[in-house]
């Protein structure tokens, strides 16, 4: 069970709505199983060159190649690496931990896609070497615009398992 | 020699290897020498101005080179350099 202050849940939903139809993305920090802060990270996908898209694989890559750069950010996100590094440094300086990553699904449910799972597993391969804790993966769904849904998952061995989150009122 | 960790998307360029040993004294030299051994890989890591692409972080041991001295960061025998794309995903 992870505890997330209601203000942070509202901020993630606000972020998703501000960027819709593009996907938003960000980082959560905290201590133990309590989230303390969010970092909004720029989704740079619309500014990536065609060559850079090979960072994605298979069907997702084919889908992205068919779309205009602007449309690509509607179906995927790529965090700005510099902002991600700055956030990680700030988290460390506050003696907090990286708790997880969030992103939005503008038109689909709050469930990890195959791309989410593939890239989460890719990150698993690096993060142990970099001594980072296992992250949660949160998805903000705007599929039902008046009823946004946020769900959290652990992704291990290419399987996503939902983790309960409890809203903490402030 | 420096152990260089290759991210999944670039492994086709290193014959599938996830780690390669490369000689060099700085991050910039390692990238150049990596590209001599595996042609084309530098263009995937750096843009036309030679800067590391916006979706890639490079770590020396456990520290991002942005918080060291960037591509001029010096390495010594036994150090490890990791090329790591930032988190991505999509519906």
Image (tube, rainbow, N blue to C red):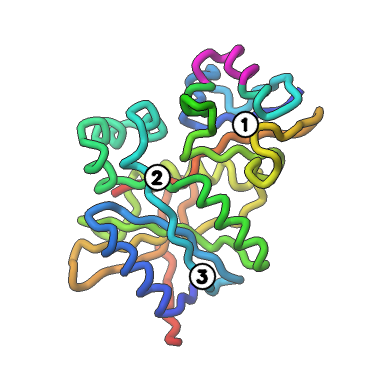
Distance in Å between CA atoms under marks 1 and 3: 31 Å
Q: Secondary structure at mark 2?
A: strand
Q: Give the quadrant of residue A11.
A: bottom left
Seen from the viewer's position, the closer of residues B19 and B27 is: B27
Q: Are marks 1 and 3 on the same chain?
A: no
* Crowdedness near tag 2: few (<14), some (14–19) or many (≥20) residues, C-alpha within 10 Å: many
Q: Label 1, on which residue?
A: B5
Residue A112 lies left or right of residue A165; in this view the side is left
Seen from the viewer's position, the closer of residues A132 and B60 is: B60
User: Residue visible at 25% across and 59% down?
Assistant: A109
Q: Chain of mark 1?
A: B
Q: Chain of mark 2?
A: A
Asked if the stretch drawn in magenta spans residue B87, the answer is no
Asked if the stretch drawn in magenta spans residue B37, the answer is yes
Q: Which mark is residue A37?
A: 3
Q: Which mark is residue A78?
A: 2
Q: Chain of mark 3?
A: A
Which span is picked out in magenta?
B32-41
């Amino acid at each position: 069970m992870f505890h997330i202050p209601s203000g942070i849940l509202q901020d993630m939903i606000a972020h998703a709505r501000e960027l819709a139809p593009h996907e938003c993305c960000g980082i959560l920090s905290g201590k133990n199983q309590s989230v303390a802060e969010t970092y909004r990270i720029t989704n740079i996908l619309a500014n990536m060159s065609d060559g850079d898209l090979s960072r994605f694989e298979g069907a997702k890559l084919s889908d992205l190649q068919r779309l205009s750069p602007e449309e690509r950010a509607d179906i995927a996100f790529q965090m700005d690496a510099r902002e991600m590094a700055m956030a990680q440094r700030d988290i460390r300086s506050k003696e907090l931990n990286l708790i997880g990553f969030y992103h939005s699904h503008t038109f689909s449910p709050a469930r990890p896609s195959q791309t989410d799972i593939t890239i989460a597993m890719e990150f698993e391969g690096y993060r142990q070497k970099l001594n980072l804790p296992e992250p949660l993966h949160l998805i903000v769904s705007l599929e039902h615009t008046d009823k946004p849904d946020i769900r959290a998952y652990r992704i291990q061995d290419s399987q996503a398992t939902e983790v309960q989150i409890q809203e903490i009122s402030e | 020699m420096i152990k260089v960790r290759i991210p999944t998307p670039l492994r086709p360029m290193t014959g599938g290897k996830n780690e390669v040993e490369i000689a060099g004294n700085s991050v910039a030299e390692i990238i150049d020498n990596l590209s001599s051994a595996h042609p084309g890989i530098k263009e995937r890591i750096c843009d036309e101005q030679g800067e590391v692409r916006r979706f890639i972080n490079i770590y020396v041991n456990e520290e991002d080179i942005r918080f060291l001295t960037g591509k001029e960061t010096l390495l010594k025998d036994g150090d490890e350099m990791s090329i790591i794309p930032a988190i991505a995903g999509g519906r």
